Image: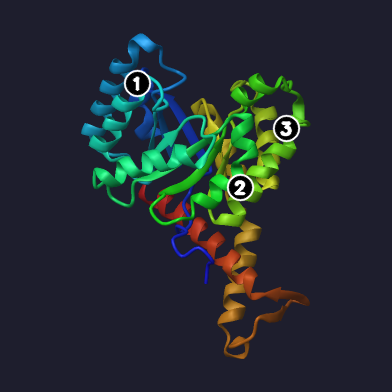
Amino acid sequence: MSRFPHTRSARLRRSVLSVPAINRRALEKIHDLDCDAVIFDLEDSVASERKEEARDNVRAFFAGPKPPGKELIIRINGLDSMFGKADLDLVLALRPDAVLLPKVDEPQDIMTVGDRLADADAPEELRIWAMIETPRGILNVAALAEFGRTGGSRLDCFVVGLNDLRKETGVPALPGRTYLVPWLMQVVLAVRAYGLDAIDSVFNDFRDLSAFADECAQGRAMGFGGKMLIHPAQIDAANRHFGPNEAAVAQARKIIAAFAEPAAAGLNVIDLDGQMVERLHLVEAEGLVHKADLIADRKTSS
């Protein structure tokens, strides 16, 4: 049994596309895209004088049919800004799958929004995602994740924002993210310790798909569950690199079948093809197969 009883079941978050809420044409194309999640960005990509227009665009989108199989997240401006309250009111009215908070530095940032959602009787399914994009956010990421596992916090996922972090620290944007890897790994350790998800940062040059694929492979190897995207051209590579491959799924099904055998009843360790397999591997295998089944179901229904 999970140490965190309210850890959510596996969700597909391989490709998390950020769409400027001011861009109506981009919003119209969402239904036709094969991304797992969509972030409606009211913050960085929208000029101050067009914030209300962007909110109207999001209202119009949610008034229509929802794209099946996609998680919908609204990224708001900070509550310390002149736009944050109106953005959060929009979230309460539209009830997306999650609200994404910018520049989360301390647990109070999450608590404030969680309390507001609770006061408005928002459904428990309306979760909180947090942008980790400042030095303080990185330093406090374990405390943030631990707080996220207290009752009522609604915290579900961290999204790394390296553009702001680079700006505040002066770390250059080098291939391989050499000097950023330790900070990225801090985020992964925190979410693994407390049962959350983590989404890797955007890759800014959407035309360089080769370098993007390399960064996806790096993010997957570090333990991220998916990548935040800025262009539909990046979706296929993200889905491929962060999704389960056929060999891994086949092995996972073998592990599940082996533990289902009567001879494995009550055993925490079994021998499978000459390899020691523990029951903890069974949990991992079940999660992998669940994700593979979700992907197959989407292909069938599309």
Q: Amino acid at mark 1?
A: Phe
Residue occupying the point 60% across, 61% down: 249
In the picture, residue 109 is in which quadrant?
A: top left
Q: Amino acid at mark 3?
A: Leu
Whether residue 250 is visible: yes
Across and down, in percent, residue 7 comes to: 47, 59
Rounded to the nearest whole Å, what is the CA distance between mark 3 and mark 2? Answer: 17 Å
How many numbered callouts? Answer: 3
Horizontal side of 102 relative to 142 (left or right) equals: left
Viewer-closest of 10 and 154: 154
Describe the colour scheme in one phrase.
Answer: rainbow
Across and down, in percent, residue 36 comes to: 45, 42
Residue occupying the point 33% across, 16% down: 51
Across and down, in percent, residue 161 comes to: 58, 30
Q: Is residue 88 above or below residue 218?
A: above
In what element is the residue under mark 2? helix
Across and down, in percent, residue 255 comes to: 62, 73
Q: Amino acid at mark 2?
A: Ala
Pointer 1 or 2: first along the chain: 1
Rounded to the nearest whole Å, what is the CA distance between mark 1 and mark 3? Answer: 31 Å
Residue indicated by mark 2 = 142
In the picture, residue 195 is in which quadrant?
A: bottom right
Pointer 1 or 3: first along the chain: 1
Viewer-closest of 65 and 184: 184
Viewer-closest of 47 and 146: 146
Residue indicated by mark 3 = 180
Local crowd size for mark 1, using a 10 Å CA cut-off: few (<14), some (14–19), many (≥20): some
Rounded to the nearest whole Å, what is the CA distance between mark 1 and mark 2? Answer: 29 Å
Residue occupying the point 64% across, 85% down: 267
Horizontal side of 150 relative to 301 (left or right) equals: right
